[in-house]
Image (spheres, helix red, strand yellow):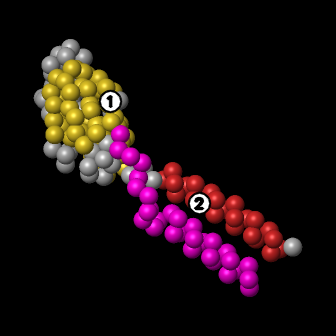
């Protein structure tokens, strides 16, 4: 009986650690710079991951024809001439996943020239540390009660 109550307490504590709002703020916003090469019909890299609040600078380099980048929902864009680069800076203040796409008609496969921007909150580090500590405690306590 005692064992199952302490097990229940640990499960509840685990849920709190995993899902409760954190008293500490997420990792401080950073300045992030990405260089993206654009060519017919792809971006390289095509996936960007940042944390909410980061100041993001995208340096777009068009390697063949004129390309652009338009980020859905953020409603921002930039265009780069062939062989040139262009810079776009914004604050990633909306969490979630956003498509970005070429906003210059650059050829037949132009509609498929897309990428993904992921804006996440970076607090899983703290939560996973908390869960690891709880797991160790749980194992220790249940071992003691067995003896
Ligand atoms: Cu394009």
Is the residue indicated by label 2 positioned so its CB lies within 8 Å of ligand 1? no
Q: Secondary structure at mark 2?
A: helix
From this view, report whether residue 19 is shown above or below residue 113: below
Is the residue indicated by label 1 positioned so its CB lies within 8 Å of ligand 1? no
- The extreme bottom residue here reads 1
- The extreme left residue here reads 105
Residue 113: percent from the left, percent from the top?
Answer: 24, 32
Residue 124: percent from the left, percent from the top?
Answer: 48, 53
Residue 72: percent from the left, percent from the top?
Answer: 20, 45
- Residue beneath label 1, please? 34
- Residue beneath label 2, please? 131
Residue 141 left/right relative to 66: right
Residue 92: percent from the left, percent from the top?
Answer: 27, 45
Local crowd at mark 2 within 10 Å, few (<14), some, or many (≥20)? Answer: some
Asked where in the image residue 109 lies, by quadrant, the reply is top left
Which quadrant: the N terminus?
A: bottom right
From this view, report whether residue 125 is shown above or below residue 14: above
Q: Secondary structure at mark 1?
A: strand
Residue 23 left/right relative to 96: right
Cα distance in 3D space between marks 2 and 1? 33 Å
From this view, report whether residue 24 is shown above or below residue 105: below
Which quadrant: the C terminus?
A: bottom right
Residue numbers of the magenta segment = 1-30
Task: Identify the residue at image location x=47%, y=65%.
Answer: 19
């Amino acid at each position: 009986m005692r064992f199952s109550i302490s097990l229940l307490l640990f499960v509840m504590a685990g849920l709190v650690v995993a899902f409760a709002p954190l008293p500490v703020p997420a990792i401080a916003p950073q300045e992030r710079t990405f260089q993206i090469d654009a060519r017919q019909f792809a971006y390289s890299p095509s996936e960007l991951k940042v944390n909410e609040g980061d100041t993001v600078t995208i340096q777009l380099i068009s390697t063949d024809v004129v390309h652009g980048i338009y980020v859905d929902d953020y409603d921002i864009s930039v265009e780069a001439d062939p062989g040139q680069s262009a810079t776009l800076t914004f604050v990633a203040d909306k969490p979630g996943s956003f498509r970005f796409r070429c906003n210059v008609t650059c050829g037949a496969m132009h509609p498929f020239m897309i990428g993904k921007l992921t804006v996440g909150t970076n607090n899983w580090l703290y939560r996973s540390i908390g869960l690891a500590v709880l797991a160790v405690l749980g194992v220790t306590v249940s071992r003691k009660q067995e003896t």
